């Protein structure tokens, strides 16, 4: 929750600076919220177990180098979850202060990341009142928190079992509806796929993935 508050404060500060420096047609600023469902394909001694609610809060700047093409960069707070199930014939010991995961028992986890989205944005010409967009980005970042709840157990810190650094691919598409001459309401779909292992283990691997609804404001 603190990370969300800090990100919102940062968004307000960035917004204030952008409004004074912005040149029409060259720069745009945006803030987005994305509720989503996440899951985590797993391998090694564990299999994937179920979907979780996830969300992402981000702010970004777009720099247009052509009328409908822009580079963008920003900062994003992500809370993404997954589940693992022990599929071997012996308990799996974890590095965190969590009891060993017994055979066929499950554990659900949530990880909080702070990432730096960097990518390319494409927009169409306006069709009626709507403009359509597509974005593709890389999300290098760091883990800032993590928790795990074993089956029939209590929620515990999971940080010792998680890698610190991460990177994901993000794709989003949707439409922009004009709210004024230079501002737009954004609505679309967003897909995140991590290609770095979330788990710090030699015999378990988990790659968080999410699909959600992106809601935002661009000006």
Image (tube, rainbow, N blue to C red):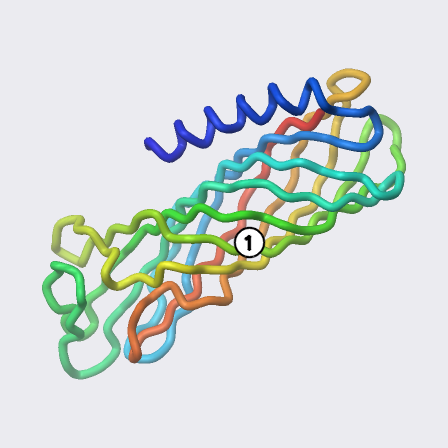
Q: Nearer the viewer, residue 187 or 77?
A: 77
**Image point (76%, 42%), residue name:** 133
Q: Compared to 211, does 67 lie above or below?
A: above
Give the percent coordinates (x, y) of residue 122: 79, 46
Horizontal side, residue 149 vs residue 5: left or right: left
Point out the image quarter for the N terminus: top left
Q: Nearer the viewer, residue 141 or 213?
A: 141
The total number of labels drawn is 1
Mark 1 crowdedness (10 Å alpha carbons): few <14, some 14-19, many ≥20: many
Point out the image quarter for the C terminus: top right
**Image point (38%, 67%), residue name:** 206
Give the percent coordinates (x, y) of residue 205: 36, 72
Label 1, secondary structure: give it: strand
Q: Would you name the residue on which mark 1 appears? A: 139
In the rendered image, which quarter is residue 51 located in? bottom left
Horizontal side, residue 169 vs residue 47: left or right: right
Q: Nearer the viewer, residue 29 or 84?
A: 29
**Image point (73%, 31%), residue name:** 28
Horizontal side, residue 31 vs residue 104: left or right: right
Give the percent coordinates (x, y) of residue 111: 35, 51
Q: Compared to 44, does 143 lie above or below?
A: above
Give the percent coordinates (x, y) of residue 94: 18, 68
Q: Compared to 97, does 190 lie above or below?
A: above
**Image point (43%, 65%), residue name:** 207
Horizontal side, residue 54 vs residue 202: left or right: right
């Amino acid at each position: 929750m603190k990370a969300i508050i800090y990100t919102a404060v940062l968004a307000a500060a960035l917004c204030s600076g952008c409004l004074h420096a912005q040149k029409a047609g060259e720069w745009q600023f945006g803030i987005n919220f994305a509720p989503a469902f996440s899951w985590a394909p797993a391998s090694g001694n564990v299999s994937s177990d179920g979907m979780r609610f996830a969300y992402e809060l981000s702010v970004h700047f777009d720099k247009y180098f052509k009328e409908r093409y822009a580079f963008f960069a920003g900062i994003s707070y992500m809370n993404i979850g997954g589940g693992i199930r022990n599929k071997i014939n012996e308990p799996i010991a974890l590095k965190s202060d969590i009891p060993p995961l017994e055979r066929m028992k499950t554990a659900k986890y949530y990880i909080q990341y702070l990432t730096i989205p960097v990518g390319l944005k494409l927009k169409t010409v306006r069709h009626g009142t709507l403009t359509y967009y597509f974005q593709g980005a890389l999300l290098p970042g760091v883990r800032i928190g993590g928790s795990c709840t074993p089956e029939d157990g209590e929620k515990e810190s999971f940080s010792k079992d998680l890698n610190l650094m991460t990177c994901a691919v993000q794709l989003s598409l949707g439409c922009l509806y004009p709210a004024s001459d230079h501002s737009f309401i954004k609505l679309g779909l967003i897909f995140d796929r991590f290609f770095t292992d979330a788990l710090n283990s030699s015999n378990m691997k988990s790659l968080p993935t999410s699909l959600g609804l992106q809601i935002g404001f661009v000006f």
